[in-house]
Amino acid sequence: MDHLPDLPAEGRIRAVVSDLTPAVDGGRFAVKRSLGETLTVEASCFADGHDAVLALLCWRRDDESATTWHAVPMQPLGNDRWRATLRPDRCGRWWYSVSAWVDPFRSWRSQMARRTDDADIRLAALEGASLAEAAAVRAGDALADRNQLLRWAERLRNDGAHADAPALKALALDDTMAEVAGRHPDRRWPAVHAPMPLDVDRALARFGAWYELFPRSLGEGGRHGRFDDVIARLPAIAAMGFDVLYLPPVHPIGRVRRKGRNGVVVAGRDEPGSPWAIGAAEGGHTAVHPQLGTLDDFRRLVGEAERHGVDIALDIALQCAPDHPWVTDCPQWFRRRPDGSVQYAENPPKKYQDIYPFDFECEDWRGLWQALAGIFRHWIAQGVKVFRVDNPHTKSFAFWEWLIGTLRREHPDLVFLSEAFTRPQVMHRLAKLGFNQSYTYFTWRNTRAELTDYLEELTAGPGRDYFRPNLWPNTPDILPEYLQSGGRPAFVARLVLAATLGTSYGIYGPAFECMDARPREPGSEEYLDSEKYQLREGGHADGDGLAPLIATINRIRRDNPALQFPGGLRFLPVDNEQLIAYAKHDAASGNAVVVVVNLDPHHVHTGWLELDPAAYGGGDDEGSVQMHDLLGGERYQWAPGRNFVRLDPQRLLAHVFQVRRRVRSERDFDYYL
Amino acid sequence: MDHLPDLPAEGRIRAVVSDLTPAVDGGRFAVKRSLGETLTVEASCFADGHDAVLALLCWRRDDESATTWHAVPMQPLGNDRWRATLRPDRCGRWWYSVSAWVDPFRSWRSQMARRTDDADIRLAALEGASLAEAAAVRAGDALADRNQLLRWAERLRNDGAHADAPALKALALDDTMAEVAGRHPDRRWPAVHAPMPLDVDRALARFGAWYELFPRSLGEGGRHGRFDDVIARLPAIAAMGFDVLYLPPVHPIGRVRRKGRNGVVVAGRDEPGSPWAIGAAEGGHTAVHPQLGTLDDFRRLVGEAERHGVDIALDIALQCAPDHPWVTDCPQWFRRRPDGSVQYAENPPKKYQDIYPFDFECEDWRGLWQALAGIFRHWIAQGVKVFRVDNPHTKSFAFWEWLIGTLRREHPDLVFLSEAFTRPQVMHRLAKLGFNQSYTYFTWRNTRAELTDYLEELTAGPGRDYFRPNLWPNTPDILPEYLQSGGRPAFVARLVLAATLGTSYGIYGPAFECMDARPREPGSEEYLDSEKYQLREGGHADGDGLAPLIATINRIRRDNPALQFPGGLRFLPVDNEQLIAYAKHDAASGNAVVVVVNLDPHHVHTGWLELDPAAYGGGDDEGSVQMHDLLGGERYQWAPGRNFVRLDPQRLLAHVFQVRRRVRSERDFDYYL
């Protein structure tokens, strides 16, 4: 006979919440925002029939009680879509959700507004009285509301006898009472979306300029550089406007199978080896290289950097040199070859015999994870808050999710930068797992089409809510071909692109400043005499130095909010393929920047640029604007539509315009914002 | 101190499965397929590092053991995407999932293929021996495989001593042994996607022609029609090629506040009332109207229809006339007005006092749901398998999900058609909840741009995996303006469009066949003298009848697989806005149809149509094709590129071409497929 299997606990929930955005893999991973950003949530909220539906955006921090939700009403956008915005004000894990319900009071009011039949109006007024009384009960301690509602209910109930129907209808539609009742809605049967995770990071995770150098190269007269030399360099780095100083690994370097200059397999006597071959008799991942100084020296560096407003980023490379203490102390964390030797890194026919990877499939994976977490905890204890993680894509995904989640629960202001130039899905996965920033393919995107497609993918593609790009024109591993052949103009072009397309960008500084353009051999992207394997005292190559331009660029970044937020990027058409142009606009401040770069470092290029006022927040009736070139200082008057540009690599092959809109003031003067 | 909170149960699962498609709201709702269709599943499967990953598509029927999964290997598509296809062969709920894992054997083999160092090859052969032995253990009872693997392992282990490295490498890379080992992979640590629901329906849910009529109009000489009259009409309906005969509600009609001709509020004596005003002294939703016959007569009709290959679809309208027995027997299922009267349906200022809706928010919602399910169960017991549900969007979503899920678990071959012309999100929600088919906005999509946009949305939009359109040019409620003013050509155009754009389509038959085009009043979409309120013996209007053309169209539909599957639709450019052209192609059979319709019922139109061979499965080097007009009988020779069309409404304003491709046979004759 009839029975009722699989009956829901409550069948009277008539509203629905669906298609909530943003969401990363349906809530499996967190959406990312930083302090200073907002989270705009949209959802489809509707119910059967024609009753009124109301919706709330709800949120709470993970460290608040799971039953304490803050809420703000959502606004209808039409077609059953609703929207509300939240501005998170503290770092860490948050949760957000949307709740919607059929609202009997609003439904009643909407029907009342359309009623024309006197008898129906009188009956409906009685219904309204019941609804008002129910709202009064819900008002509870809000005594003023409660009393207003009760008085109103009484009139709705009693005026029917003597007031005429139109007067009764007007009383029922009283706006103030709708507002009072609206404060105490009937939420007996709400539809509630599953809570969605949100990770809120410090602003540095979104906006920062990174500078990479090898401390050991900072010594003078052939002396091995020390942390104290880095401290001495801090004022110059801060003056250039950098936010992060990133150091390659600072640990003892293995002596067994140490590599020599330019990566040759056998190092000569006294060659320093690669900082990424970690561990020797002096210690492993928690020790410092004796020639760099002591742990005390390192802590002093971190403190001094903080005084300059600079974060020290440490490179964590989870791999061992053959003489790393763990190779003998914890043999269970390494794979063995059939001859009993430890398995080195290899990608046949290539061998990396100086590097032993950890075996994430070992029996003692718990012990390994704990030890690796210990490395991070050790450096956090020394004051480090920013980690650049080397090759995370060759370590277990599950490990990263656990590690970053665990550490950020303890220290919500940590920032992890993923150094992975690998398959797109793997890079995206790492970002979903918790990395706050990611290296990108920017390094190899040179033409206008390549740059446009890639930046549109980064800023508008599915990764926009979790994949934060950090754009690097060069790294110690990569001297791109474009920089090898383009001379100073090529460096300027890549610098301007990285610093204005990316809210975060970085340079391998000493080599970039001096425009080192010599590859190890033709066709190679390795630097000749790379600092990875040797000291490079006093920089890399001759040249008149990019430091002043870099300082200008970083100042422009700090002065213009448009360059500090990932949204608001729009490419502008130019009728010359060698010229790339884009606007960045920050709606909150009204700030707008237009950048034009000549991508050809060898020739002057001219073109007509199509300026759409919408790109800088202007309306259809927008007049001309002043384009103030913050690089060159010139000011131009541009109008919506076609404008002429000419960029000479021998002079300066980029414009970085601040857009100054003409505003008619109350006293009828024109001025520029 | 260090601790390991939130550690996963197994940290060695290195593979990932993500972005599985298709999926409806991340698996919250079922993907729909029908018998005869395939389900092609794609997923991103990858792991950290460079080891080989393998992936399986797994599936099971809901009625199979939850641990019994069938599986087929997925094929890599590049960029870490994988694909496999499943052909479900039984109706009901299925589950599918994807499992991926890092495969040590494939990883070893891939490395071996790239090895050049003799010593490494010898060591790797020993590793291979271990892997082969492990595979032999997994082979278990597959004795042939087991023995082959063990023999091979022995050679890999021992040949190293005397064979040279290239010979050893060749032995290790033996293709047959790779195949044998591949049959017994090491799946200790698989990543498994959460199971995703799939609803498999009978083919009728995908492909069918529907015919709606009012049985009570089939009587002769003013007599009320009976089920026996419907039985007598069955041969004609089957001869026209219809698959479903859909009947408005067949229950006793309320006498209280019964509506009269053309919907006037007070019915005259002896007026029959609306079949949707359900319930009177004779019974409610489980009774039959005495003048239509008995329940036995009804069962006989269902059986006779089945003999003709026709399904009887019953209209279920979950609402009551004021004299429905439940109004007095189960008063708790209805809302009361403040004066104690039952709340009728209303949308102020409109009132529908002859209709009492159920209160889905009543205390006894469980009892109500059970009773409503009982209605469906009653008619299922009479042999009905197809239900057209009236206005489902005004009843609780949760109810529909429970009802359809419950009934289809008992009867997997049920088909529910959702009659909802409401907001898009609501219509989509109903489809997600389980309705197998849905009414659409096709009825009001007339221009080429409207039709193109809407059909592209239906076939390629997010609803493609759960929202099955059923296209209706008219219904008893809707006589669209286009049909009112366009004469016979308008009816022909809408018929051809519905029957070739939709795999399912339906007509309110007697009115359509006779091209009834008279509205109740100018500007109304209601029929004059609508059958909803009165008997219309012998049809609707004069005219030479569309029955022969309808029969031809339905035969074309049955002969051409391209018209039976929802995919493979492509619109073709024509340089005349009044001409719409599209190709439908079924890859499995190779069948292709090209339809051209003149949307202007008043004028001859000509144009050049751009024929892209890809639209009918042709390649770039495709020659000319024969276009065989299945409506008019003519054959044309068309070439890729521009082809001329001319359509005269006074003759026939549509082509339905079967595309016959020229194939060079082995004996060098040309013939047409």
Image (cartoon, coloured by chain):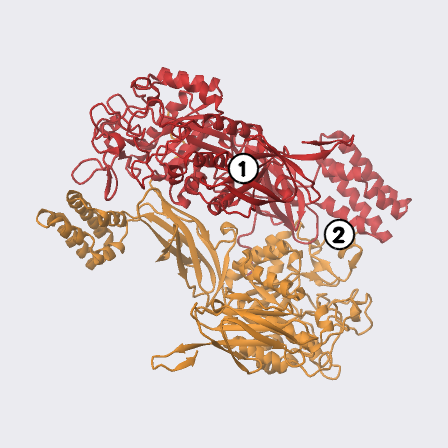
Chain colours: A orange, B red
The total of numbered circles placed on residues is 2
Q: Which residue occupies the foreground of this view, A560 or B332?
A: A560
Asked which secondary structure carries label 1, the reply is loop
**Whole-percent x, y for residue A311 in the image:** 56, 73
Q: Is residue B146 left or right of residue A27?
A: right
Which chain letter goes with mark 1?
Answer: B
Instruction: Report crowding for label 2: few under 14, some 14 to 19, many 20 or more residues within 10 A (C-alpha).
Output: some
Asked which secondary structure carries label 2, the reply is loop
Amino acid found under the numbered disc labelled 1: Pro
Tell if the residue under mark 1 belongs to the same chain as the one under mark 2: no
Q: Which residue occupies the foreground of this view, B130 or A121?
A: A121
Q: Is residue A102 left or right of residue B71?
A: left
Q: Mark number for residue B114?
A: none
Instruction: Report crowding for label 1: few under 14, some 14 to 19, many 20 or more residues within 10 A (C-alpha).
Output: many
Q: Which residue occupies the foreground of this view, A102 or B348?
A: B348
Amino acid found under the numbered disc labelled 2: Arg
Q: Is residue A479 visible?
A: no
Say which residue label 2 marks. Answer: A336
B541 above or below A332? Answer: above
**Whole-percent x, y for residue B375 in the image:** 35, 26
B665 above or below A497? Answer: above
Which chain letter goes with mark 2?
Answer: A
Q: Is residue A157 visible?
A: yes
Nearest to viewer (mark 1 / mark 2): 1
Say which residue label 1 marks. Answer: B566
- Quarter in which the C terminus of chain B is drawn: top right
